[in-house]
Amino acid sequence: MKSLFKTKEGKNEILSLYDQKLKELNIHSEYIEVETRFGKTNIITTGETSHPPIIIIHGSNGCAPIALETYPSLSKAYKVYAIDVLAQPNKSAETRLSMKDDSYGIWMNEIMSQLKIDGVTLVGFSFGGLVILKTLEYDESKIKEAFLSAPAYIVNGNPIKALLKIFIPMKRYIKTKKIKYVEDFLEEVFTDRDEFAIKYLSKVFLNFEMDFTPVPVISKAGAQAIKTPITLFAAKKDILFPGHKLIKRAKKIFPSLKSSILFEDSKHVHSRAQNAVIEHAILENT
């Protein structure tokens, strides 16, 4: 299978930044490798084994250390498992799963079986939200609760607006290698400026085969079958998954929706303060 990393040098640069971010977190952590039918999954775990399990899932073009940085205090109350999602610029296998079938749900349930955990809390941002919802659709028996932050798979934003404000700056950077276009991209997507994101994504855009497949949305029947309590956090200024639209549909289709919060001044990637609000809500449910 052809690698999603365009060159060996590019892969090394991206994974070097991955290691740098994990080191900067200054936490006691361990790597776990889980074999699934879709290939090796890399997991970073931290926290006491006696604590209840929580799985955190990063967004598209992300990695486990970024998820750990987003919610730094979860290990005080949980045994944390930060997953490197398959076919993303990280240390897991490069097998690209379909967003249209049960593959992500099968994959996540295999991980939980291999880890021998149940009563699991799931936390996911953006594409991580799609992974969680696919898991709940396929088999939610091991899941206690789910927290979704600006999740994919419920609604989509205006494709023309996304093209102009997100994808064209990305393509211009790939063509010119001018860092200005990465900053233009991040200005539309991130609420706070993030220096690491500039460095990381500037390498990813040039050195990794990104997936531009249109993101599907969950059916009403699929959503209504889910019994797991869901807490939803949405962003009013989110170009990809607009907050008002997201909450409106979620309230209509999810009978298990426990609560929803709209961050009025947030873009797709929440601010540090907003992520702290999410983390507090998760810890309150320990």
Image (cartoon, rainbow, N blue to C red):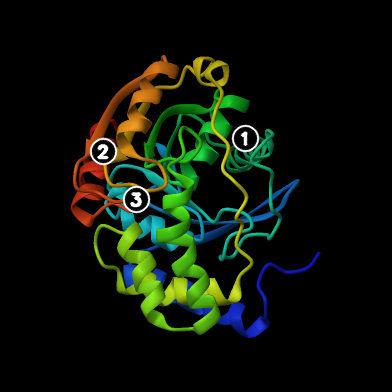
Of residues 189 and 138, the one nearer the viewer is 189
Q: Is residue 147 above or below residue 191?
A: above
Q: Secondary structure at mark 2?
A: helix
Residue placed at 68% from the left, 60% from the top? Answer: 94
Q: Which mark, by number, is residue 211?
A: none
Q: CA distance from mark 2 to mark 3?
A: 23 Å
Q: Earlier in the sequence, mark 1 or mark 2?
A: 1
Look at mark 3 in the image and give the residue it sits on. 268
Q: Secondary structure at mark 1?
A: helix
Look at mark 2 in the image and give the residue it sits on. 283
Circle 2: residue type: Leu
The quadrant of the picture occupied by the C terminus is top left
Circle 1: residue type: Gly
Nearer mark to the viewer, of 1 and 2: 1
Nearer mark to the viewer, of 2 and 3: 3
Give the quadrant of residue 191: bottom left
Residue 15 in sight: no
Circle 3: residue type: His
Q: Position of residue 217 (x, y in %)?
A: 54, 32
Q: Is residue 169 above or below residue 163?
A: below
Q: Earlier in the sequence, mark 3 or mark 1?
A: 1
Q: Secondary structure at mark 3?
A: loop
Q: Earlier in the sequence, mark 2 or mark 3?
A: 3
Give the quadrant of residue 21: bottom left
The tally of labels here is 3
How crowded is the residue under tag 2: few (<14 C-alpha within 10 Å), some, or many (20+)?
A: some
Q: Position of residue 127 (x, y in %)?
A: 49, 46
Residue 161 in sight: yes
Look at mark 1 in the image and give the residue it sits on. 105
Q: Report if the CB atoms under discs 3 and 1 are less than 8 Å apart.
A: no
Q: Is residue 25 above or below residue 220?
A: below
